[in-house]
Amino acid sequence: MTSLAPILPEVIVGLGAIVLMMVAAFVRRSSMIIHVAAVAILFAATFTLVGAPQQAGAVFGGMFAADGFAAFGKLIIFLSAAVAIVMAHGWFDRDFEHGGEYPVLILLSSVGAAVMVSATDLMMLYVGLELQSLSAYVLASYRRNDERSAEAGLKYFVLGGLASGILLFGLSLLYGFTGTTSFTGIATAFGEGEALSIGLTFGLVFTLAGLAFKIAAVPFHMWTPDVYEGAPTPVTAFFASGPKIAAVLLATRVCLDAMAPAIDEWRQIVIFAALASIILGAVAAYGQNNVKRLLAYSSINNIGFVLVGLAAGGEQGAQAVLFYSAVYVVMTLGAFLCVLRMRDADGRPVESLASLSGLSQTRPLLAAALAMFMFSLAGIPPLFGFWPKLMVFIAAVDAGLRLLALAAAAATVIGAYYYLKVVKVMYFDPPAEPFPRSRAPVETALIALAALFVSPLGYLLIGPLGRLSANAASLF
């Protein structure tokens, strides 16, 4: 029972998923199931913030860490899951008769993601990652009668299985050449001797390659645009937030904890992935006419900036990663909530960039909110998205990586083009067919809250959010 208290958030969400799975077999009102699931996951988030999970330390023989770093990640994951569940309510009413399985899959994926950010052992790492991934494969192909959704699920499953094999091979090499699955034991093995053995080097490379797929970092990004476009919009919003941040924080713990003595080796890989993700995410988005594909490349681009903070290493780099992750999730969820409002007169989703033409004249408030999210994702001051980019650049400079910070800052200008293109279409192009107005008070409230967060008013949160992220990063 002493060990169960620190994992109570995971227990709450896991039991909630099992109970709702049984209820969904008999209750045909998906709205009730969705609301219950959202309440369960918010309750878990509340306990994560105020309960034992950020104080207990290592449990289950050192395989699982209940510390501030994990608690920070779980808050992001659970809040992302709650938004993804709530924003699907109207979507199910329009397109599905029964949607009870959706929140169950979101809850199960959230449990896996929560285990990922707390894992301090290779076995726990893989269990959490696979639980999250298996649920995600089903979510991507949830619309069984939609060819794009089926294609997205198939691509995600095939490439995800390949990435899991690569990761598992890397983990097996780490275990084989260190004799332990514990992050502490692996760090000790990496610290012995002046040079790494060839086996440990290959284990490091394959492990980071498998994790790079999960965070959609270049060159393992190829699945992202197709899956984001084909998956249902609420699912895409979830993929771009909770699970992605879970993988980022898992990679942060692996690099700064298990592989800390080998920083010179893994830093080279992270720097390459960071710059390649920033540049490709910016350039490849230029010709995109689908808003969801554009946001997919935006996700790749922003992950590159997160990796700049990871490359800096140390407590300051970890704090920059955490701070950036929190702000990125709000910006991304806000953008996808706006995309969810893009519907034609028959209620079918519209995703083309051209459909946003003249949106400032037909739906001025929606256009203003989406413009704020685009400017914030681009890192344009005075919006709040500028601050986390500044933090990762400062962390890189303080770590002696001035050229990396300079290159990343210069690439920011390249990426700003397609964000500004969206704003230009909304404000300067002739109006297209207007989107019908619908009663969605919860979605409207979430968009408003996210817009306030990324507005200049968000700078009021620098102190509280900075203290939370600094406390979480003090582990390193």
Image (cartoon, rainbow, N blue to C red):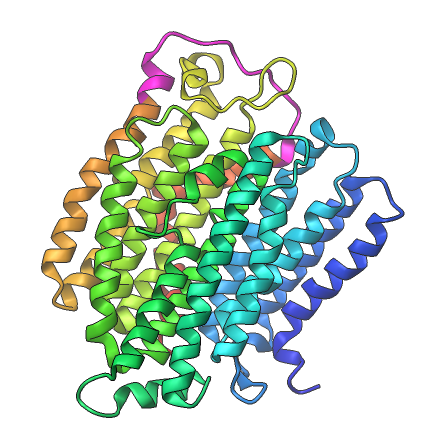
Quadrant of the rendered image containing residue 6: bottom right
Provide residue 408's location: percent of width, then percent of height.
18, 49
Tell me if residue 427 is in the magenta stretch: yes
Tell me if residue 359 is in the magenta stretch: no
**Left or right of residue 18, residue 425 in this image:** left
Magenta residues, start to end: 424-442
Query: In which quadrant of the rendered image does the C terminus lie?
Result: bottom left
As drawn, 31 above or below 148: below
Q: Is residue 322 visible?
A: no
Point 28% across, 48% down: residue: 277
**Left or right of residue 154, residue 462 in this image:** left
Point 13% across, 63% down: residue: 401
As drawn, 405 above or below 360: below
Front residue of 412/266: it is 266
Point 18% across, 43% down: residue: 411
Q: Is residue 203 visible?
A: yes
Provide residue 412's location: percent of width, then percent of height.
21, 42
**Left or right of residue 141, residue 176 in this image:** left
**Left or right of residue 399, residue 266 in this image:** right
Secondary structure mostly seen in magenta is: loop
As drawn, 150 above or below 400: above
Front residue of 242/207: it is 207
Number of numbered discs on residues: 0
Query: In which quadrant of the rendered image does the N terminus lie?
Result: bottom right
Quadrant of the rendered image containing residue 306: bottom left
Quadrant of the rendered image containing residue 31: top right
Provide residue 427's location: percent of width, then percent of height.
35, 17
Provide residue 214's location: percent of width, then percent of height.
44, 56
Point 69% across, 70% down: residue: 11
